[in-house]
Image: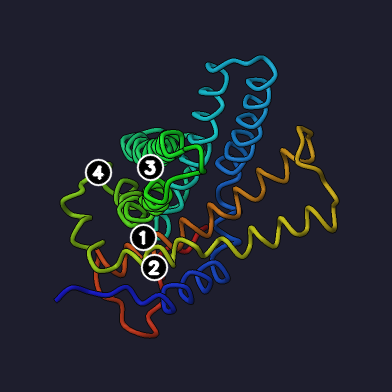
Amino acid sequence: MRQKLPILRVARQTFDYLGDHGGPLIGASPLLILILLAGIALGMHLDYMAYVEHSKLLELTGWVVSTAAPVLAAVAWHRCILLGETPPARVVAGKPERMYFIVLIVGAALMFVATLLCYIVMLFAQGPDGSHWLGVVLVLLLVLAPCFFMGYIFLALPHAALTGKMEISRIAPLVRGNRLRLLAVAALPVPLLLLLEAARIFVLQMPREPSIGYYLYSAIATFAATLISVTSMSVSYRTLALKPMEEGVQLAPSATVT
């Protein structure tokens, strides 16, 4: 029988794990967190330089750096949560890290293709009386298309971190019937990001413009979102792929970070 993902239980276990093990997990991976923060800040600065110099190469480089920045920390955290491994004290870029990056690239490429198709459809749907209704419907479908693939990416990432493989044939049965549930779990970092954005606007009064403060804010927001996302992915993957979890069982009790 196909297993349904229990959204509320996954959310509760995610935040329970972060409350119990989040501090030690962060304390055990200072180098990986530093790489994440520096990579996000560098990627944003490269994007700004690309805008100033009208350079597509710099823009592509900034995108690659920003995409790759969380990979090392994310893979280490997945393996810590699911396998009980201690995050490495040095930089490790093996097969799981490479495959994790490839899955992220595939997800980003799908988003890019959907955005490009939206632009093309809107371009051809424009008429003397405005946009044709059929074009608006097609654009709406294209906007929703990434949600269809979200579940695959959401489970493929922890699978890649554990196995170093991207096995869609093993992921597809887990996603089937759980697309909306996985989408809801994937949205767990959103409230925190909205809270940070409100703090930036109303408390810090920090404009969205290139500055050390804004780069640091964006890097910290990405770090927080990555930590929540990685934990929720791991809980979801463990629930669906590894073994059914009974109520009251703690997530990865062996994953205590030293």
Instruction: Residue 107: give its label.
Output: 3
Query: Label 3 to label 2, Cα distance in Å?
Result: 28 Å
Q: Bin the neighbour count of mark 4 within 10 Å (Cα to Cα): few under 14, some 14-19, many 20 and up.
A: many
- Mark 3 or 4, nearer chain start: 3
- C-alpha separation, residue under disc 2 versus residue under disc 1: 6 Å
Q: CA distance from mark 3 to mark 1?
A: 23 Å
Q: Are marks 3 and 4 in contact (CB under 8 Å)?
A: no
Q: Is residue 177 left or right of residue 221?
A: left
What amino acid does circle 1 point to?
Leu
Residue at x 46% of width, y 74% of height: 13
Question: Of circles 4 and 1, which is in front?
Answer: 4
In the structure shown, which secondary structural element does the residue marked by tag 3 occupy?
helix
**For the residue marked with disc 2, what is the amino acid?**
Ala
According to the image, label 1 marks what residue?
A: 82
Circle 1: element type: helix
x and y, in percent, of residue 105 in the image:
39, 36
Relative to 136, 218 lies left or right: right
Report the residue marked by disc 4. Answer: 166
Circles 2 and 1, Cβ within 8 Å, touching? The answer is: yes
Q: State the colouring used for the structure image.
A: rainbow
Left or right of 211: which side holds 29?
left
Which mark, residue 35? Answer: none
